[in-house]
Image: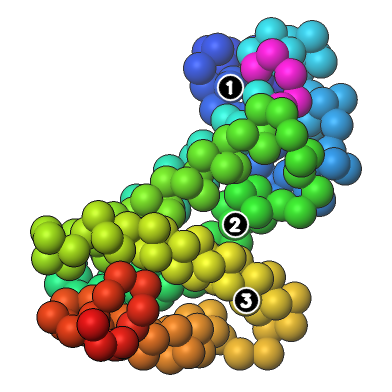
Amino acid sequence: MDASVRSRLSRSDRMEQTLGVAHGLFAERGYADVTMEEIAAEVGVTKPLLYNYFGNKERLYIACMEQAGDSLTRTVGAAIAGTDSPGDALGASVRAFFAFLDSDRAAWAVLFDETLPASGEVADKVAAYRGQILELVSGSLLAQMPDSLRDAHRVEIEALSAALLGAAEELARWWLRTQAISAGEAAELLISTVEPGIRARSAAAVSPTSKPGKGTQKE
């Protein structure tokens, strides 16, 4: 970009420009390999100005992550909202997750970068987004159970939702690495493996002969 054009940018426009550049670099190379010096040079500003805008590398990354995380949670939430059974909710959430990955791989790369620090502000933000997705899925599954059974099955549903998210993340990494099947096929593979179990446990939960966490065992 021409220097005269850069000089005319407002602070908010410059910050938006910086986020776009940083997001691209982080998605391409990972958090660990990108420096503030490189981002500043790419944007055409000084490193002190970059720190003035965002504070540090962690907060700049979090700003990039928020765009991706908010988009993912909206996508999954909207997909789940139209379902009326636990099995349908599971299928909708997995399909939305993989559709998001397929349509915006840069956003995925920023959210699930394996070079991110294991502790600190960035790690806390990643955990918060995972928590939001877990709440969306587990909350939807619980909402579709009879009121009288929700408390008894809450822990089980939360555990299954956590396992599902972990499986979806690992399958997505495999898909990105191999490209052996389409994103849609990857989603259907996971759904066809997990959904029958969810439907069976949901049916057992509402059966008068079942106990919480014991499937179809008779009392």
Q: Disc 1 on helix, strand or loop?
A: helix
User: Mark 2 or mark 1: which is in front?
Assistant: 2
Write down the residue under mark 3: 171
Write down the residue under mark 1: 15
Closest to the observer, 41 or 178: 178
Q: Position of residue 161 (x, y in %)?
A: 44, 64
Compared across the picture, whether 152 is left or right of 161 comes to left
> Measuring 66% from the left and 27% from the top, which residue is drawn there?
121
User: Mark 3 or mark 1: which is in front?
Assistant: 3
Q: Position of residue 54 (x, y in %)?
A: 65, 17
> Where on the picture, by quarter, is residue 37?
top right
First reached walking from the N terminus: tag 2 or tag 3: 2
> Where on the picture, by quarter, is residue 218?
bottom left
First reached walking from the N terminus: tag 2 or tag 1: 1
Q: How many marks?
A: 3
**Distance between mark 2 and mark 3 Cα atoms:** 13 Å
Compared across the picture, whether 202 is left or right of 180 comes to left
Discs 2, 1 touching: Cβ within 8 Å:
no
* Mark number displayed over residue 62: none
Check disc 2 and give the amino acid type. Trp
Check disc 1 and give the amino acid type. Met
Q: Is residue 96 magenta?
A: no
Q: Is residue 202 above or below residue 30?
A: below
Q: Which residues are magenta?
A: 54-58
> Where on the picture, by quarter, is residue 144?
bottom left
Closest to the observer, 167 or 179: 167
Residue 189 seen in the current view: yes
Q: Is residue 57 magenta?
A: yes
Majority secondary structure in the magenta region: helix
* Mark number displayed over residue 108: 2
Check disc 3 and give the amino acid type. Leu
